[in-house]
Image (cartoon, rainbow, N blue to C red):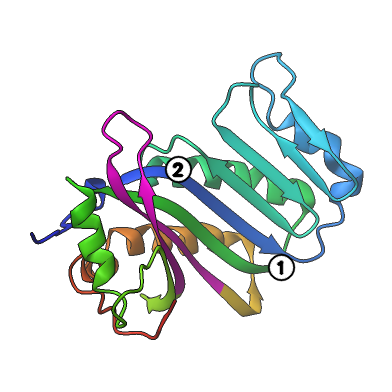
């Protein structure tokens, strides 16, 4: 059976992480209170934890979105992502406010990591896919890692065998994919929007989907595979 992904929404999206790394972020120590204020909803104080090096904050206790502001990076996790466009808009708004409070002018890395899940009709189908990815008989592969340059960004792929916790114990593969760029010469805040949008477009691109399809059907992704 051929497994073909023509659109990204054919995969279940379970988690999303975005991160901006920067230098000279120690204004965090003096301006932590201002940062907390960014997450107020109406008159409610946001739940947060703070140390000398980082602030972890949500807008409300049961929020599925979490932010971490540290002396060298701003990180965001959404455990119930809807679509990449909405995620990007939420993060860009918050990152603009946070970077302005910290007066960040030197950004060194931008990355976006997502967990996508592909479900199979049977465990046998999943095992058949993994059997194509190992060249030695008698070995059972449960995890595969490799990296590939897509549209100018390094993407680390970590592919795991999984089983859904339901009555049917649905067989699945988790695609844990982290795409990023490290800047030899730092960039400014104004380029954050452009760079993250480029990563979003990467995830929707035929180049990205072709890697997913090659794993599901042949395991041939064109780069060195590390197992």
Residue drawn at (24%, 50%) of the image: 123
Q: Residue 207: x, y in percent?
A: 26, 71
- Element class at badge 2: helix
Q: Who comes first in sequence, dot 1 or dot 2?
A: 2
- The tag on residue 29 is none
Position of residue 180 in the picture relative to residue 169 (left or right): right
Q: Which residue position holds label 2?
A: 87
Position of residue 119 in the picture relative to residue 225 (left or right): left
Q: Decide whether the magenta segment is chiefly helix, strand or loop.
A: strand
Looking at the rendering, which quadrant does residue 136 occupy? bottom left
Quarter of the image for the C terminus: give it. bottom left
> Compared to 116, does 44 lie above or below?
above
Q: Which region of the structure is painted magenta?
A: 154-181
Q: Which residue position holds label 1?
A: 106
Q: Is residue 23 magenta?
A: no
Q: Residue furthest front?
A: 138
Looking at the rendering, which quadrant does residue 68 occupy? top right
């Amino acid at each position: 059976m051929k497994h073909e992904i023509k659109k990204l929404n054919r995969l279940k999206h379970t988690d999303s992480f975005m991160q901006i790394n920067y230098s000279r972020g120690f204004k965090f120590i003096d301006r932590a209170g201002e940062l907390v204020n960014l997450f107020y909803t109406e008159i409610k104080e946001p739940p947060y934890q703070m140390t000398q090096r980082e602030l972890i904050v949500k807008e409300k206790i049961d929020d599925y979105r979490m932010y971490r502001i540290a002396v060298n990076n701003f990180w965001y996790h959404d455990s119930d992502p809807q679509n990449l466009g909405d995620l990007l808009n939420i993060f860009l708004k918050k990152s603009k406010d946070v970077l302005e409070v910290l007066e960040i002018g030197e950004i060194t890395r931008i990355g976006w990591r997502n967990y996508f899940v592909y479900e199979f009709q049977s465990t046998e189908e999943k095992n058949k896919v993994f059997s194509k990815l190992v060249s030695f008989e008698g070995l059972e592969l449960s995890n595969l890692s490799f990296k590939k340059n897509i549209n100018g960004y390094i993407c680390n792929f970590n592919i795991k065998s999984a089983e859904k916790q339901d009555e049917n114990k649905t067989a699945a593969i988790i695609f844990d994919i982290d795409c990023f760029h490290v800047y030899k010469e730092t960039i400014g805040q104004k380029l954050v929007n452009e760079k993250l949008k480029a990563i979003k477009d990467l995830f929707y691109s035929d180049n990205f989907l072709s890697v997913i399809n090659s794993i599901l059907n042949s395991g041939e992704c064109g780069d060195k595979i590390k197992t």
